[in-house]
Image (cartoon, rainbow, N blue to C red):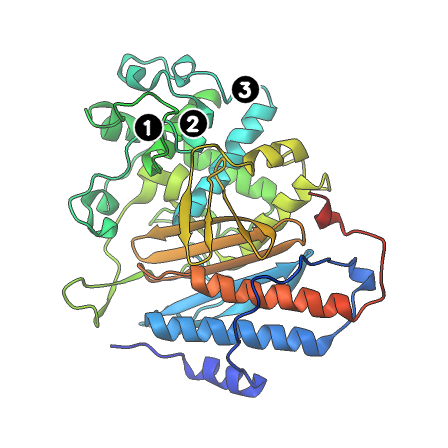
């Protein structure tokens, strides 16, 4: 069955006079974001931005035949657009919106990188010390030469998922149903007894994207915290960040307000929409097991940029630490899709688009896909989440980013010239 936009979404689009946006010039000059007080109050430009974004979101949902998609966009700390199209729960016809709680998959790595950086700032760890100084058990010896920095940047040599199929999401390790009480327990069971757990090349010699490497990193963080489980550490971080109760390590038993359903399509019958298979993501809380919503992902991005600029961010991280997390690691390269290809950093990726540095991460899991984009110099944050797997969101993110860039240029052109620079332009 092909799921079309619900009547409410179609009515909203029609009432707004939505039109299909055209690609923007990739060679356009770098933008200048004026202080909010000097930006023109151009309601027509903002309306046009919202129309373009809603059109792009609706079209991408139709193309992917996805149950639902949620979106949130901010600029300079101001929410420009938030909402959703389609359904968070198809069976009960519950609409999808910016607060729909969904799997964000590998965007979880960004949260874990912040947690590790906090421990580094507190003097609890050195990113360049061997993991063997923290994990001293005999069964952990094979990981002893790796460093935290290498685990964060996927250069430690820890294997990725075991592949039995060319389609990654068909591989058995995505469908683990066992609950693990800690990252340490998961590491010992999934990696310690696996002869292929690490590459034959020495740590630091190659880029090998690995969610299991972040599970191992979670075990390090547990040890340094006095053996607190990684889900507890992440929950404390989310509270400190001021995120909603919907941003949590995924567990099936708790009641989570606005939790959406996840969906997948049968490989043998792609026209059939099914509830996603039951899985337990506790083995990869630190690398791909967090639930969140588009609104919270944008709040997280805004918080990271405030930290980068030395503004009030509740003591999350120092500016130099953010700069370190967002700095390219030599020898790494990730193709995030469409226009975004670039080196990996520490828990984040980076790319260049229209002359701007983009900080980003994507996520792919059973029943869900996600993308988070930040443009530090102008303070833009875009988050999109979908409750269907195998849905590329990068092209959609590019079209929304183009709309934001055009909005910035138009509103800056309508304002009086200024010699001031916004806080977000300092990074």
* Res 40 seen here: yes
Where in the figure is residue 244, as x and y percent of width and height? 54, 52
Q: CA distance from mark 2 to mark 1?
A: 8 Å
Q: Quadrant of residue 51?
A: bottom right
Which marked residue is nearer to the observer: mark 3 or mark 2?
A: 2
Q: Sequence-wise, which precedes: disc 1 or disc 3?
A: 3
The reply to whether the C-beta atoms of the residues labelled 3 and 2 are less than 8 Å apart is: no
Q: Is residue 253 above or below residue 87?
A: above
Q: Residue furthest front?
A: 27
Residue at horizontal 59 percent and vertical 55 percent from the top:
381
> Helix, strand or loop at disc 1?
loop
- Could you say whether the residue bearing mark 2 is in a helix, strand or loop? helix
Rendered residue at 35%/52% (across/down): 364
Exactly how many numbered labels are in the figure?
3
Quadrant housing the N terminus: bottom left
Element under label 3?
loop
Q: What residue would you read off at disc 2? A: 150
Q: Which residue is mark 3?
A: 124
Q: Is residue 331 left or right of residue 186?
A: right
Residue at point 83%, 63% (across, down): 38
């Amino acid at each position: 069955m092909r799921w079309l936009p619900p009547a409410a979404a179609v009515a909203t689009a029609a009432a707004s006079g939505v039109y299909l946006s055209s690609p923007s010039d990739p060679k356009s000059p770098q933008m200048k974001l004026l202080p909010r007080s000097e930006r023109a109050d151009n309601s027509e430009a903002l309306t046009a931005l919202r129309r373009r974004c809603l059109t792009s979101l609706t079209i991408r949902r139709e193309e992917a035949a996805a149950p639902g998609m949620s979106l949130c966009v901010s600029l300079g700390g101001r929410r420009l657009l938030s909402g959703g199209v389609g359904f968070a729960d198809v069976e009960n016809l519950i609409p999808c919106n910016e607060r729909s709680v969904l799997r964000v998959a590998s965007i979880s790595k960004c949260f874990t990188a912040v947690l590790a950086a906090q421990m580094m700032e507190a003097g609890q760890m050195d990113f360049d010390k061997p993991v063997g100084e923290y994990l001293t058990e005999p069964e952990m010896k094979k990981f002893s030469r790796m460093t935290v920095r290498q685990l964060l940047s996927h250069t430690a040599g820890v294997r990725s998922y075991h592949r039995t199929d060319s389609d990654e999401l068909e591989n058995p390790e995505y469908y683990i149903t066992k609950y693990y009480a800690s990252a340490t327990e998961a590491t010992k069971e999934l990696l310690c007894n696996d002869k292929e757990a690490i590459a034959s090349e020495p740590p630091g010699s190659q880029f090998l994207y690995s969610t299991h490497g972040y599970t191992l990193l979670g075990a390090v963080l547990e040890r340094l915290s006095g053996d607190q489980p990684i889900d507890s550490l992440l929950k404390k971080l989310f509270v400190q960040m001021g995120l909603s109760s919907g941003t949590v390590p995924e567990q099936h038993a708790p009641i989570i307000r606005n939790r959406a359903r996840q969906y997948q399509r049968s490989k043998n019958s792609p026209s059939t929409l099914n509830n996603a298979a039951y899985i337990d993501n506790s083995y990869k809380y630190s690398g791909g097991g967090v639930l969140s919503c588009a609104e919270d992902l944008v709040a997280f991005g805004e918080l990271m940029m405030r930290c980068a600029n030395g503004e009030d961010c509740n003591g999350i991280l120092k500016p130099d630490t953010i700069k370190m997390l967002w700095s390219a690691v030599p020898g790494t390269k990730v193709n995030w899709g469409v226009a975004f290809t670039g080196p990996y950093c520490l828990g984040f990726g980076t790319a260049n688009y229209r002359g701007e540095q983009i900080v980003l991460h994507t996520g792919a899991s059973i029943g869900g896909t996600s993308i988070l984009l930040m443009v530090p110099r102008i303070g833009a944050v875009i988050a999109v989440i979908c409750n269907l797997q195998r849905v590329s969101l990068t092209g959609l993110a590019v079209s929304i980013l183009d709309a934001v860039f055009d909005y910035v240029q138009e509103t800056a052109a309508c304002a009086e010239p200024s010699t001031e620079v916004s806080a977000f332009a300092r990074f």
